[in-house]
Image (spheres, rainbow, N blue to C red):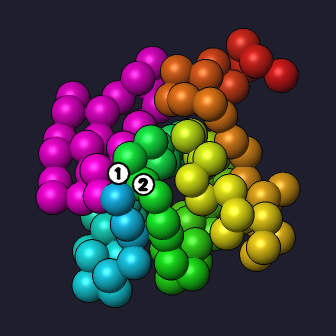
Amino acid sequence: MEKQTQNYVVRELDGVTVVRFTNKSLTATHDLDRITAELNELVAAGTHRMVLDFKHVEYISSAALGMMIALHKRLNDLKGGLILSHPENIADLLRVSRTDRFFKTAADPKVAVKIFNGEVP
């Protein structure tokens, strides 16, 4: 399964949903509202293990961070999880907001899937 929107591409990788953002910036409120609604639809449809891939993203807003925190909590409540891949460009915001220890991170989606599958400690 692969689905593309104007802001991201969704694909399945070994039972894990990978959402790769295609925008360089995740700051526009109207985009974030739509992305949040669409990610919540994925969760409502049964996605409980998700990777947010920031490979192409250079900047995120605090509103995007809030969306990520809410999604993390929702997935954890469903006994799933959220892993951020390619977090290097958003690392400063994660550190300043003190959420760098809150989120699990992985170098890329394949490593994230291995973490979900228990192949990487």
Give the residue drawn at x 54%, y 29%. 108
The local crowd at label 2, few if under 14, some if 14 to 19, many if 20 or more residues have their Cα within 10 Å, is some
Which of disc 2 and disc 1 is earlier in sequence? Answer: 1
Residue 27 in picture, x, y percent from top left: 39, 78
The quadrant in which residue 17 appears is top left
Give the residue drawn at x 27%, y 76%. 31
Picture quarter with the C terminus:
top right
Which contiguous range is marked in magenta?
1-23
Q: Nearer the viewer, residue 51 or 79?
A: 51
Q: Which residue is mark 1?
A: 21
Visible in this render: residue 42? no
Give the residue drawn at x 21%, y 29%. 1
> What secondary structure is marked by label 1?
strand
Residue 85 in picture, x, y percent from top left: 56, 40
Real-space Cα separation, disc 1 to disc 2, in angstroms: 7 Å
Q: Which residue is mark 2?
A: 57
